[in-house]
Amino acid sequence: QQQVKQSPQSLIVQKGGISIINCAYENTAFDYFPWYQQFPGKGPALLIAIRPDVSEKKEGRFTISFNKSAKQFSLHIMDSQPGDSATYFCAARPSLRGSQGNLIFGKGTKLSVKP
Amino acid sequence: DAGVIQSPRHEVTEMGQEVTLRCKPISGHDYLFWYRQTMMRGLELLIYFNNNVPIDDSGMPEDRFSAKMPNASFSTLKIQPSEPRDSAVYFCASSPRTGGTEAFFGQGTRLTVV
């Protein structure tokens, strides 16, 4: 069964610190790895994404690191701010024909950044 | 564009009643997804459509759940009869023609079945 495993379930970081969220996938080939950010009462929104031919992608304070051989990818939030407090989901899209519309999500990480 | 629009935002219903959730995707998007979010199971894909055609409904939990997309601008998710374990937040999302990369989510419908 296709799965994306995400850890930790929750994370508390001091303002200015680095938040790190990890995800791992199994077996099935994926060709797109987005991270979504969700604030309370809102739907998830795309934060940053990476394709497997790239090992790292950075957008502002957010960086995705991708390790294809280990089938792992992670989100790093540098200089974390209280406004970053949200639930973060990693996801992966199967590269199989016919499944390309489907994103498989991790279970989420609730991040709290303390002032 | 106003984004993906879902209605109602909140729904409280009694066990056994029929519930219909509605979604208007972003104009021009060819993919539409229905997700269910709970604390225990996270975000689960229930069903998705491509060009109004259901592609994968393997996530639909039971025959009590059904989804339709009669045209490119409207979709419904129906639960009949509803049960307390159906209580969750239901999200609709849509993606553009480019193979379903970024999914744009609506604000969700919080369903409570008492």
Image (spheres, grey):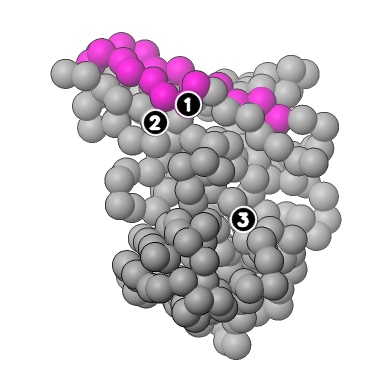
Q: In this rendering, would A86 be left or right of A76?
A: left
The residues tagged by marks 1 and 2 sit, at their Cα atoms, a distance apart of: 6 Å
Element carrying mark 2: strand
Q: Are marks 1 and 3 in contact (CB under 8 Å)?
A: no
Residue B38, position in %: x, y? 48, 48
Q: Is-magenta flag for residue A18?
A: yes
Quadrant of residue A31 within the rendered picture: top right
Residue on which the image places disc 2? A110
Name of the residue lying farthest toward the bottom: B70
Q: Which residue is mark 3?
A: B45
Q: Is residue B91 above or below residue B72?
A: above
Query: For the residues marked 3 and 2, what is the alpha-carbon distance in whole angstroms?
Result: 20 Å
SS of the residue at dot 1? loop
Amino acid on which disc 2 is placed: Lys
- Chain of the residue on which disc 2 is drawn: A
Choose between A73 and B77: the one closer to the eye: B77
Residue flagged by tag 1: what amino acid is it? Gln
